[in-house]
Image: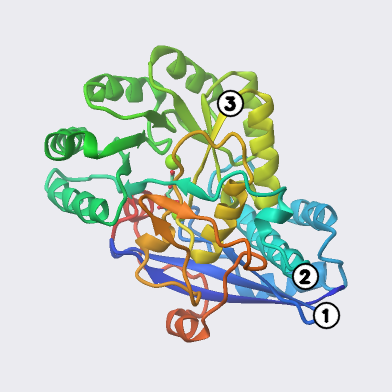
C-alpha cells in the first residue's frame, strides 16, 4: 500500500466561551482506497503567525506520496527533520506532526480492520476519567458565570474540574471558596494551572494563599523550561506538581532535575501518538505518573487520545480532554462520548479511530486559512472571548 495524496481542510469552531479556534482536518489517501483521517488541532495559540495551509499541503504531499503508511518510524523521522522540536509548548510544527501521525494510525488500523487501541498494544482501560476546565478569571465578576458552568457540567456528570489561575487571585480564591461552599465533596478540583505565566516564587506565594482549599495538583508553576525552578517549587509544596511535555529534551531535563511528579502528555504538544507513547514510556521508566493533557481537540483528536490513553498503564491521574464538550460544533458524524465524567474509548468493533467525517458540518465550519483576526494576547492565554 502506498500513500497517493494528502488533503488539508481548515475549520473555525466556536467554543461556548465565545472563543473561536482554528483546526486543520487531515486526510491521507492510498492506492488501495483506504483513507486515514487526523486533526492538527487548535492553531489559535501564540506565537501569532499563521502557517500557509496551501503550501503545507504541497510540502506534505511531496514528503508522503509513495511512502508505505506502515513505515511510521521512518515517516515520523522525516517529519521531525522538517518540523523539529524547539522546546516551545505551542510549537506549530508539533501540531503538524501530530495530525499526520494520527491519520497514519487511523489508516493502518482501518487497513487491518482493528481499532487504533489494538494497534497500540491493546486496551488496558475502556474509559478515561476527565475533568472540565474553568478558564482563567480576570475579574471577580466572572466568578458567578463560572459557578454556573460548574452547576451545568455537574448535571452532565462532570464532577472533577480544573482551574486556570494566577491573573486575579481574589477571583481565584472567591471561586474556590464558593465551589467548596456550594458543592462540598460532590465536586473535586483536580488542579490549579498557572500556565507558566509566573516565576515559581510568585506562584509559591499564591499557592500558600490558596492552600486552604482542596485541589489535587499544581500545574505549570514556573516559567517555561525552568527545570531547576520547578524542582525548587516542588520541594516546597505538599501537592504533586504536573508539567506538560513539549520536547524530549525538556522531558529529559525534568527527569534529570526531578522537577515534577506527573507528566501531562498530549499528542498535540509532543507531535503525535507515536511521540506521546515514547513520553509515557519515559515517564514510566522514571517512576513518574501521567495524565493526558489537551489543547481542546475536536472529536478526531480526542478519539486519538482516547485510544492512546486506553493503552497506557501509568495514567494514574484524571486527564483533560474535553474539547468536544467545549465547542459548539464538531466535524464528525458521531462525536466521542462522555459518561459520568469519563471519556469513552471508541468501540473495539469500529476500525481506526472510529470516527467518520461529516462534510455537511465541515462545510458550515470551513474557513479559508489560519489567518488571525483581532484576537488579543489575553484571549489567547485565557481562552475567553
Ligand atoms: O492545560 C493546559 O495548559 C491547557 O489545556 C492549555 C489550553 O490553553 C488549551 O490548549 C486550550 O486551548 O484551552
Ligand atoms: Mg496546563
Ligand atoms: Mg488549545
> Is residue 333 shown above or below 120?
below
Judge the density around disc 2: few (<14), some (14-19), many (≥20) Cα neighbours within 10 Å. some
Callout 1–callout 3 Cβ contact below 8 Å: no
Q: Which residue lies at the image location 22% right of the left edge and 34% below the top edge?
A: 185
Q: Is residue 380 above or below residue 3?
A: above
- Percent across and percent down for residue 140 are 13, 43
Q: Please state, as top left, top right, bottom left or bottom right, where the C terminus lies in the image.
A: bottom left
Kindly identify the residue that appears in the image at 40 percent across and 23 percent down: 200
Q: Secondary structure at mark 1?
A: loop
Q: Quadrant of residue 235?
A: top left
Q: Label 3 belongs to which residue?
A: 288
Instruction: Kindly identify the residue that appears in the image at 44 percent across and 72 percent down.
Output: 330
Q: Give the mark count.
A: 3
- Measure the C-alpha gap from mark 3 to mark 2: 35 Å
The image shows residue 321 at horizontal and vertical percentages of 46, 51
Q: Quadrant of ligand 2?
A: top left
Residue 32: assigned label: 1
User: Which residue is tagged 2?
Assistant: 111
Nearest the camera: 151 or 244?
151
Element assignment for label 3:
loop
Alpha-carbon span between mark 1 and mark 2: 9 Å
Residue 380, percent from left and from top: 38, 54
Amino acid at each position: 500500500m502506498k500513500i497517493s495524496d494528502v488533503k488539508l481542510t481548515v475549520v473555525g469552531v466556536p467554543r461556548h466561551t465565545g472563543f473561536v479556534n482554528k483546526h486543520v482536518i487531515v486526510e491521507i489517501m492510498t492506492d488501495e482506497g483506504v483513507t486515514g483521517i487526523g486533526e492538527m488541532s487548535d492553531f489559535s495559540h501564540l506565537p501569532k503567525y499563521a502557517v500557509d495551509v496551501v503550501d503545507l499541503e504541497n510540502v506534505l504531499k511531496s514528503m508522503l506520496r509513495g511512502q508505505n503508511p506502515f513505515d511510521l518510524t521512518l515517516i515520523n523521522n522525516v517529519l521531525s527533520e522538517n518540523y523539529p522540536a524547539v522546546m516551545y509548548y505551542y510549537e506549530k510544527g508539533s501540531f503538524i506532526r501530530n495530525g499526520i501521525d494520527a491519520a497514519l494510525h487511523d489508516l493502518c488500523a482501518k487497513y487491518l480492520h482493528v481499532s487504533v487501541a489494538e494497534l497500540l498494544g491493546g486496551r488496558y482501560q475502556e474509559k478515561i476519567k476527565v475533568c472540565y476546565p474553568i478558564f482563567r478569571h480576570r475579574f471577580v465578576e466572572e466568578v458567578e458565570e463560572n459557578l454556573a458552568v460548574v452547576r451545568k457540567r455537574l448535571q452532565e456528570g462532570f464532577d472533577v474540574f480544573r482551574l486556570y489561575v494566577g491573573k486575579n487571585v481574589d477571583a481565584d480564591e472567591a471561586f474556590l471558596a464558593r465551589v467548596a461552599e456550594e458543592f462540598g465533596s460532590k465536586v473535586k478540583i483536580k488542579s490549579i494551572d498557572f500556565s507558566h505565566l509566573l516565576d515559581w516564587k510568585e506562584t509559591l506565594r499564591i499557592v500558600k494563599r490558596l492552600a486552604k482549599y482542596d485541589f489535587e495538583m499544581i500545574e505549570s508553576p514556573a516559567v517555561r523550561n525552568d527545570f531547576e525552578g520547578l524542582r525548587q517549587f516542588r520541594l516546597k509544596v505538599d501537592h504533586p506538581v504536573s508539567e506538560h511535555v513539549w520536547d524530549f529534551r525538556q522531558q529529559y531535563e525534568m527527569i534529570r532535575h526531578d522537577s515534577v511528579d506527573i507528566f501531562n502528555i498530549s499528542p498535540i504538544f509532543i507531535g503525535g501518538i507515536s511521540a506521546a507513547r515514547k513520553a509515557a514510556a519515559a515517564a514510566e521508566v522514571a517512576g513518574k505518573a501521567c495524565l493526558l493533557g489537551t489543547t481542546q481537540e475536536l472529536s478526531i483528536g480526542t478519539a486519538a487520545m482516547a485510544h492512546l490513553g486506553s493503552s497506557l498503564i501509568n495514567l494514574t491521574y484524571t486527564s483533560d480532554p474535553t474539547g468536544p464538550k467545549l465547542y459548539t460544533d464538531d466535524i464528525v458524524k458521531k462525536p466521542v462520548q462522555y459518561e459520568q465524567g469519563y471519556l469513552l474509548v471508541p468501540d473495539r468493533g469500529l476500525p481506526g479511530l472510529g470516527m467518520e467525517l461529516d462534510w455537511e458540518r465541515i462545510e458550515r465550519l470551513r474557513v479559508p486559512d489560519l489567518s488571525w483576526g483581532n484576537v488579543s494576547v489575553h484571549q489567547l492565554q485565557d481562552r475567553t472571548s
